[in-house]
Image (cartoon, helix red, strand yellow):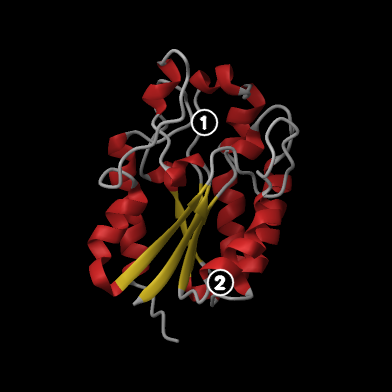
Amino acid sequence: MKRILAYGDSNTWGFDPVTWGSVPITLERYPEDIRWTGLLQKALGKDALVLEEGLCGRTTAFDDEECDGRNGLVTLPAILKANQPLDAAVIMLGTNDCKSAFNASSKEITAGLELCLKKLLDVVAPENILLISPLYLETAAFDFGFNDRSIAVSRELKRDYRELADKYNTAFLAASDHAKASSLDGQHLTEEGHRALFEAVLKSIVSMDMKN
C-alpha cells in the first residue's frame, strides 16, 4: 500500500464555505465523499492510503499572531515523522499567505513554499511530489482578511509555483485551472470544485511511479 501525504490548508481539510453564513459561525467540514482527498482515497482504493493533513489558516512559513500553529514550515517536520514512510506527497498552500496582514508578494510566498518543499524532498522523491498552486481569490474574500492586493497576488502564484516545480522537477498542478472559489467567501472550494480538483490530482498521482 502506497502512503500519500496531502499537506495543505482549509481546502485540504475540506472547509464548507456555506458555514460562513451560519450564526454563530462554525468550522464545518465537507464529508469524505465530497472532499477531494476522500474522493482520491476512494478512487485509489486498497492500493494507497491518503493521509489528510489539512489545517484551516495554515500558511507556507508565516506565523499568524491571531492563530497559533499555522506556520506550515514549522509543523511539517513533525507531520513527516508521524506519517513515515511516505511514497508520495501533495502540497497546496499559499491562500492564507495572501492575507493583508502579511502583505506578502507572490515571490515571498513562493520562497516560503520552497522551504516546505525542501523538507518534503528529504523523504519523498521529486517525481512523486505534486505541487499545487491555490485557487484565485475573489472579492467575497474581502470580509475574511483579504484585500485587492491579495487577489492580485493569488493570481501570480500559478506562474511562480510552476517555476518552483520546474526547478525541483516535481509535478505541478494549478487548482485555478480546474475550480473557482465559492462566491460565498471567495476562497474555498465548492462541492463541484472538490470533484474537479480530485480528478486533476488523480491523473497526476496515477502517473507517478512511486517505486520504493
Q: Is residue 147 above or below residue 120?
A: above
**Residue 124 visible in the current orientation:** yes
Q: Which residue is drawn at the image coordinates 42% and 31% (left, top)?
A: 181
Q: Report which residue position mark 1 lands on.
A: 137
Location of residue 95 with respect to 137 vertically, above or below: below
User: Which is more toward the observer, 1 or 131?
Assistant: 1
Residue 65 horizontal/vertical position (percent): 75, 33
Q: Residues within 10 Å of mark 1 (few under 14, many from 20)?
A: many
Horizontal and vertical percent position of residue 117 = 63, 63
Q: Check if mark 1's residue and mark 2's residue have beta carbons within 8 Å.
A: no
Mark 2, Cα crowd under 10 Å, few <14 / some 14-19 / many 20+, is some
The residue type indicated by label 2 comes to: Asn
The structure residue drawn at horizontal position 36% and vertical position 53%, both measured from the top left corner, is 37
Q: Which mark is residue 30?
A: none
Pick the quarter of the image with the N terminus: bottom left
SS label for mark 2:
loop
The mark found on residue 169 in the picture is 2
Can you say which quadrant of the picture contains the C terminus?
A: bottom left
| Residue visible at 63% across and 59% down in the picture | 76
Q: Amino acid at mark 1?
A: Leu
Kind of element beneath mark 1? loop
Q: Nearer the viewer, residue 177 or 120?
A: 120
Q: Is residue 199 visible?
A: no
N-terminal-most mark, 1 or 2: 1
Front in this rendered view, residue 144 or 131: 144
Q: Position of residue 145 (x, y in %)?
A: 63, 23
Residue 76 position (above or below residue 9)? below
Q: Nearer the viewer, residue 158 or 191?
A: 191
